[in-house]
Amino acid sequence: MILEENIILQIKSKLNELSKTEKKLGEYILQHSVETVNDNTSELAKKAGVSPATIVRFCRSIGLSGFSQLKIRLYADSSSVDEGLYSDITSNEDVALIADKLVLRFNSSIAQTAKHLDTSHIEKISEIIDACTTIYVYGLGASHVVADDFTQKFSRIGKPVVNTLDHHLLSSALISADDHSLFVVISNSGETNEVIKLAEIAKQKKLYTIGISQNANSTLAQLVDFPVIHHGGEAVMLRSAATTSLVSQLFTIDVLYYAYVNKHSQKILKLLKDSKINIQTFFKENS
Amino acid sequence: MILEENIILQIKSKLNELSKTEKKLGEYILQHSVETVNDNTSELAKKAGVSPATIVRFCRSIGLSGFSQLKIRLYADSSSVDEGLYSDITSNEDVALIADKLVLRFNSSIAQTAKHLDTSHIEKISEIIDACTTIYVYGLGASHVVADDFTQKFSRIGKPVVNTLDHHLLSSALISADDHSLFVVISNSGETNEVIKLAEIAKQKKLYTIGISQNANSTLAQLVDFPVIHHGGEAVMLRSAATTSLVSQLFTIDVLYYAYVNKHSQKILKLLKDSKINIQTFFKENS
DNA sequence: CAAAAAATGAAATATAATTTCAAAATAAGC
DNA sequence: GCTTATTTTGAAATTATATTTCATTTTTTG
């Protein structure tokens, strides 16, 4: 990446070397950087109280080729600074605003999760998935949605996945599972009763255990062979942070999935194609 | 709205909806995004082997006002070009790189979905949800994960939700549902057999119908009272675009949920608190 | 295979950026 | 303090660039 200097800082630093009118223009642009991107020379000239010619001269003075260039650079550097979007969702807000706030939250929890993901763990897990005969998955409540996503992804590429909400049934299944099985537990808190019990059973049976949780210090994270920690994002409203942590979990599953698919693409590619063809042939549908 | 969707991914995702020449141009621009920022229409036209008119049409096709806009947006998003984050995930890639690529794709499909969401529809739907006695939900395959998320969210705030994969059972339920019921259908393609049949039954019974789909022209979208269209994002690898469209759907559900909670916060706040207390008291857990 | 529809590019037009140049403001010299 | 150079500035002219129009070609449909 050709790291260009931030144009806003560049304008600021050169402000005092400029002539009176150009400085005035520079100050106006700094104040209205977002607006300026959508202006043309004559509009901006009117607003800033200068002539179009001064605008072009100003651009040259700060080291750019012209006004078009300024707009390009301004847009790139004046990215999302609207403070309003970071505040919590409160009563009676416009739907569009709610949506914008959610975008920000989704994005930041995904970015945060990616940043802190232990990629070497992921790689090891991907190998275990390849080696194991059956994967058992468990998730309760919101985490069950993630467990389902996991199940769908890995089933489709030909990996046998057992996924049930019935923890009695699952504990029986785990007890009779063979050594080369893998137990994946998804729990945001990592403290849910059922989850801990099932993980303990799997440990006793010496199965590989993976725990996907937001809390690195949780009982679950301490218990399993490979804790995968995601950073879930804070409460948006009414202490209902469920969705951002859901997305973080789904993201984590996706990285795991692609890491696995990536390493073992030859055999999977064929399977994927076949399963798609099969579904379409038998049920005449595509989603 | 400050957070715009990533233009490079946007071009990629629309590539197949474009005409032959526009597609050719799009491919050229993707290959030479950095160079294009310094070109004008006639130069680019020559290099890409199309006419200037096509360039302008192309910009409009991908949702921009014109060529200048394209250059502005291209520059802003070309920072990741050198790092190769836009290329598809191929064999034997580093896990960290896979994660970075996925972040970009998740973020872009969320932004895209938010941008095109019809907020007035959302508002109306939120009112219908308030007025209805029972909500029926149906989603198959990946969409079932979303249906579950919907169910969890609205059940928790005291709205009765019926959600089953058994379409025979669901059709009986719909036939005996009262007029003030709502049927929410989730289908990425909007063409799945079961989905259409069920939606038709609901229409006949004059229930309110909502269809969440990626395709505005699909049978489902045409059939329901309120189509909610999300923009899903392109294939990352092996034609498995499931995750980005999943996230888009979850995002859409979330906006709907918060829009509803927001408008009717007084009564819901109490319910939410109560249900949390109940779960903790009875099962001694918190997730 | 013919008719209709869609896509495309050449040329015309509109728009916007840039340059020129004369007037105004400022600085330097006497 | 006045005159003369120098710089700064904006109005108008020019040039460059984007956009639209429309006739032609290509593709699709009946």
Image (cartoon, coloured by chain):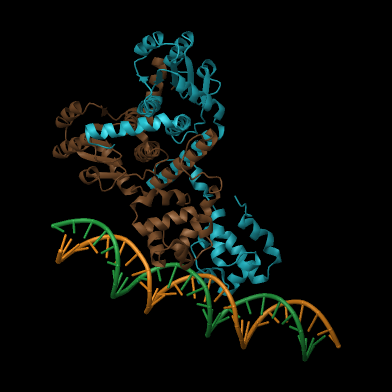
Chain colours: A cyan, B brown, C orange, D green
Residue at screen point 48% across, 40% down: A107
Residue at screen point 54% across, 65% down: A68
Front in this rendered view, residue B222 or B205: B222
Q: Is residue B163 above or below residue A287?
A: above
Residue at screen point 33% across, 29% down: B148
The x, y position of residue A156, in whole percent, is 35, 28
Among the 4 quarters of the image, the one containing residue C19: bottom right
Q: Is residue A8 above or below residue A248?
A: below
Among the 4 quarters of the image, the one containing residue B135: top left
The x, y position of residue B11, in whole percent, is 42, 52
Q: Is residue B50 above or below residue C26?
A: above
Residue at screen point 18% across, 36% down: B197
Left or right for B190, reference A260: left
The x, y position of residue A265, in whole percent, is 44, 32
Total labels drawn: 0
Q: Quadrant of the C terminus of chain B?
A: top left
The x, y position of residue A125, in whole percent, is 50, 23
Left or right for A115, reference A201: right
Can I make out residue A118 in this image?
Answer: no
Can I make out residue A151 in this image?
Answer: yes
Q: Is residue A65 above or below residue B196?
A: below
